[in-house]
Image (cartoon, rainbow, N blue to C red):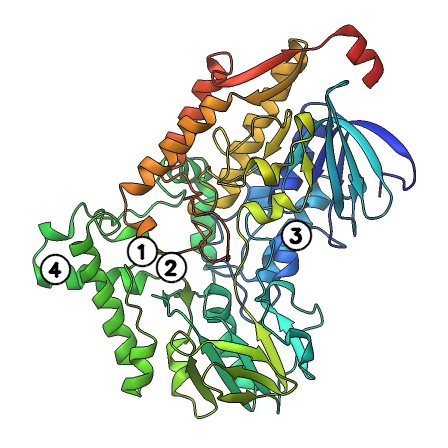
């Protein structure tokens, strides 16, 4: 721990979060820019989302060697992955390895949450306060809180009345949970639940799954990483990363075909089968280029997946409940291992809560609107996240003229490039809303953001610039760009956390830039190369700098 409680300290920068974003940002500020930086992290160790999400089966859906840092050749060569798709524990070990390799821990204050963040216009500085009494004044304030770090737990009536054990996949006990001999209920069938359900079912006496919306889950096809394959990747890491950055999602899919209508029906089925067997996102992002743009093309792939579900689930009625009826791929496609076969077990029940919602929590379990009751020993919530904006609002940001970020974004996020927001000078968001974020390979997207932020800070320091923030008009333009690209696809046609539709009362706005990582980087670089076009640069007055120091 570096920051002392009940004292006020001055530093160059504050970073919140010690996952992928915070670790690389700290390394860059300290070791490349020579700055003093404080990092605050709520957990007692590094890891970010991979620290908290320890539920059974937690695993990355991007292949291991892609889901890693590229900035250090030494780290790339020293670290070896054991599986094609790394599990939570191995990713956490990797981030611990990075933190130790770069000697980052001593500059991170753990078990500490930011409770307020206020910009002082008199001195152009941020004042950051924590729940442990820290007060830190800094010029640069950087969020590395991630996009999926604020859980969305439903506020059912009687929520606190359940007498059994309650768990959430987003904050799983570190010691694990033994469900042997227990009856268990789990609410939700999103990506986390789809990974957890098969393993919980193997232990539990009985598992009841409460599903509102089924998912087009496809096989992950995980396996051990062969040494020969690992050596081949390490031998061409430069090309490997170049290909990744040039691809739409930060992971190349070389078997992608232009249009489903250019193949015969027989060839379509064969190609879809090949993509299915390749696993991961090969079907979703690597099959045909028109699947997420053309409803007729989409319908072919949707029915292909539904037929796969019907083949794998023995009971026809259960199979149909597990078959989605919305457009394929418009929700993030979960990847699974034996998920659908789990419903063939005698100790697993599926309850459809779309027509018959949960009405309240009882002492013994859950009651539905119909009056039906379900009782169990343990209750698990796997109900998603308040994505993008939720983690940022938790920082309690107040910018110029006392305006809170939550109020400024009351109708939708307002950013330029998903990096900054007008009225909140020198506040940077790594993978913020309206950037590629969750629809690009996260570690590579984080590196691009960190490096752009670092270059901006370097430019400001070299030119005596006190503040940077977007022009308000440019925020409107960027919103139009993000929405325009999104509306050219099928994705906004489905209610998802991409739009905030999973949170009651949250304004609906598409919060991901879908133009691809390479195009996005060009836009960011062009802004910087043109004297930060679209941003307002404020020169420092001598008296401001004197007071701030």
Identify which residue is drawn at 53% across, 69% down.
57
Element on which disc 2 rests = loop
Cα distance in 3D space between marks 1 and 2: 7 Å
Which is closer to the viewer, label 4 or label 1?
1
The percent position of residue 425, horizontal first and vertical second, equals 64, 24
The percent position of residue 235, horizontal first and vertical second, equals 45, 42
Q: Which residue is mark 1?
A: 284
Residue 65 lies left or right of residue 90; in this view the side is: left
Q: Quadrant of residue 215?
A: bottom left
Label placed on residue 47: 3
Q: Residues within 10 Å of mark 3 (few under 14, many from 20)?
A: many
Residue 310 lies left or right of residue 187; in this view the side is: left
The single residue placed furthest to the left in the displayed view is 264
Q: Is residue 417 above or below residue 181?
A: above
Q: How many numbered badges does the structure rendering display?
A: 4
- Give the mark, 2 or 3, whose residue is nearer the N terminus: 3
Element on which disc 3 rests = loop
- Give the mark, 4 or 1, whose residue is nearer the N terminus: 4
- Give the mark, 1 or 3, whose residue is nearer the N terminus: 3
Q: Which residue is mark 4?
A: 267
């Amino acid at each position: 721990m570096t920051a002392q409680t009940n004292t006020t300290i001055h530093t160059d920068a504050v970073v919140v979060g010690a996952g992928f974003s915070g670790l690389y940002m700290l390394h860059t500020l300290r070791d490349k820019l020579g700055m003093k930086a404080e990092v605050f992290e709520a957990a007692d160790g590094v890891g970010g989302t991979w620290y908290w999400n320890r539920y059974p089966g937690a695993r990355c859906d991007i292949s291991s060697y892609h889901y890693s840092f590229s900035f250090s050749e030494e780290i790339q060569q020293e670290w070896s992955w054991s599986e094609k798709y790394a599990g939570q524990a191995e990713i956490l070990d990797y981030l611990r390895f990075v933190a130790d390799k770069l000697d980052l821990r001593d500059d991170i204050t753990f078990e500490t949450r930011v409770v307020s963040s206020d910009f002082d216009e008199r001195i152009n500085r941020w004042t950051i306060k924590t729940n442990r009494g820290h007060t830190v004044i800094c010029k640069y304030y950087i969020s590395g809180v991630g996009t999926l770090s604020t859980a969305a737990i439903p506020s059912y009536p009687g929520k606190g009345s359940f007498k059994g054990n309650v768990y959430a996949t987003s904050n799983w006990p570190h010691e694990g949970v033994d469900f042997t001999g227990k009856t268990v209920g789990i609410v939700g069938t999103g990506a986390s639940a789809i990974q957890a359900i098969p393993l919980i079912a193997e232990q539990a006496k009985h598992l009841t799954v409460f599903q509102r919306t089924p998912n087009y889950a496809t096989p992950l096809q995980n396996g051990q990483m062969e040494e020969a394959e690992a050596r081949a990747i390490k031998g061409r890491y430069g090309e490997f990363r170049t290909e990744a950055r040039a691809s739409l999602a930060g992971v190349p899919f070389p078997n992608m075909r232009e249009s489903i209508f250019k193949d015969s029906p027989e060839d379509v089925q064969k190609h879809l089968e090949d993509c299915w067997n390749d696993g991961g996102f090969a079907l979703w992002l690597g099959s045909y280029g028109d699947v997420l743009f053309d409803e007729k093309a989409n319908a072919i792939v949707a029915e292909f997946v539904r037929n796969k579900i019907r083949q794998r689930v023995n009971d026809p009625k259960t199979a149909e409940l597990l078959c989605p009826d919305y457009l394929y791929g418009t929700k993030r496609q979960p990847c699974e291992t034996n998920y659908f076969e789990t419903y063939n077990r005698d100790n697993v029940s599926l309850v459809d809560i779309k027509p018959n919602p949960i009405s309240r929590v009882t002492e013994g379990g859950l009651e539905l609107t119909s009056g039906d009751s379900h009782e169990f020993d343990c209750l698990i919530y796997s109900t998603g996240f308040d994505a993008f904006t939720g983690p940022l609002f938790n920082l309690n940001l107040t910018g110029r003229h006392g305006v809170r970020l939550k109020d400024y974004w009351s109708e939708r996020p307002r950013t330029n490039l998903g990096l900054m927001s007008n009225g909140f000078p020198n506040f940077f968001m790594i993978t913020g809303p309206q950037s590629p974020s969750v629809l690009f390979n996260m570690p590579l997207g984080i590196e691009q953001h960190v490096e752009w932020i670092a270059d901006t800070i370097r430019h400001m320091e070299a030119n005596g610039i006190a503040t940077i923030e977007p022009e308000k008009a440019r925020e409107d333009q960027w919103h139009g760009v993000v929405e325009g690209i999104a509306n050219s696809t099928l994705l906004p046609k489905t209610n998802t956390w991409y739009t905030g539709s999973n949170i009651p009362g949250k304004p609906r706005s598409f919060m991901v830039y879908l133009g691809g990582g390479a195009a996005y980087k060009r836009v960011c670089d062009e802004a910087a190369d043109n004297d930060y076009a679209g941003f307002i640069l404020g020169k420092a007055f001598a008296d401001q700098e004197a007071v701030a120091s």
